[in-house]
Image (cartoon, rainbow, N blue to C red):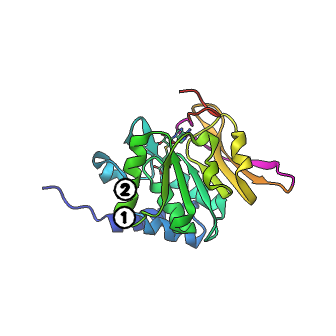
Amino acid sequence: MGREIDFAAERGRMVDRLVRGGYIHNPRVREAFLAVPRESFLVPEERAEAYRDTPLSIGHNQTISAPSMIAIMLEEALLQRGERILEIGTGSGYHAALLSSLVGPRNVISIERVEALAERARSNLASVGFGEVTVVVGDGSLGYPDRAPYDCIMATAGAPQIPDPWAAQLSSRGRILAPIGPRHGQVLVIATKRADGGLDAREGTPCAFVPLVGSQAWPD
Ligand code: SAH
């Protein structure tokens, strides 16, 4: 019999490393990482690795991002409780759970193109108390107009440029965080909506996300 892993202790140590490494500054982001068990969002073969700071396979050729990368995005997004978020690329549901801890579970919509992943994400989320997050199946390169406007649209898959429909679905204080650039290796772009409806964009950290596949992004 293998030794049982003390996931809660490992989670605490990972969060300490993210703080010491300068990835987490905001106490609310720290609390969110402590509140969400990453192991519950992994396939069984990957569970022992839950608190390594690395992307891990979730099947269907997709990966859950490294915690430090998610921390960078959550810090940049400056999310307030009650803000409405659209996440593009649900994957395992882990990032959606973190968003839910920050803004409240009814305020998170996450869209996933692979139906089997969306189903698993729903069950992962429900199993650890985040069942109120809304997971929909569809092409997130078109955003999700049914629940717009959003205060933040956060993409966890990389696109060649910011898809036009996203800006149209932002609220007046809205911002977009998305990996933008070539298919393999992007830069995190942070864009905020101006009063005239246009976007002011700046470039953050280099990153490497799986491609956003859709009618306003990469072909299949
Ligand atoms: N945020 C996820 C990891 C995302 S991996 C997590 O926490 O686990 C990127 C995901 O984006 C993959 O699941 C992939 O299927 C999905 N994806 C790619 N193109 C998409 C699109 N056009 N619309 C919605 N989801 C998409």
Residue 34, image x, y percentages = 45, 68
Judged left or right of residue 200, residue 49 is: left
> Callout 2 environment at 10 Å: few (<14), some (14 to 19), or many (20+)?
many
Which residue is located at x 30 percent, y 53 percent? 48
Horizontal side of 50 relative to 106 (left or right) equals left
> Which residue is disc 1 drawn over?
128
Q: Is residue 176 above or below residue 80?
A: above
Where 84 falls versus 167 (above or below)?
below
Query: Would residue 37 appear left or right of 151 to someone viewing this image?
Result: left
Quadrant assignment, res 26: bottom right
Label 1, label 2: how far apart the Cα atoms are: 7 Å
For the magenta stretch, what is the residue range? 196-212
Q: Is residue 133 above or below residue 104?
A: above
Residue 124's tag is 2
Most foreground residue, 161 or 216 = 216
Residue 61 appears in view: yes
Q: Residue furthest right?
A: 196
Q: Position of residue 122 (x, y in %)?
A: 40, 54
Q: Is residue 181 magenta?
A: no
Instruction: Locate residue 103, reporting x and y percent.
Output: 57, 67
Tell me the residue at 49%/40% (across/down): 113
Specify the amino acid type for callout 2: Asn
Tag 1 and tag 2, C-beta contact below 8 Å: yes
Q: Residue at x 66, y 35 (%)?
A: 181
User: As drawn, is 137 to the left or to the right of 38?
Assistant: right
* Neighbourhood count class around disc 1 (C-alpha, 10 Å): few under 14, some 14–19, many 20 upward: some
Residue nearest the viewer, comparing 48 with 156? 156
- Front residue of 144 and 121: 144
Residue type of the residue flagged with mark 1: Val
Which of 78/3 is in front? 78
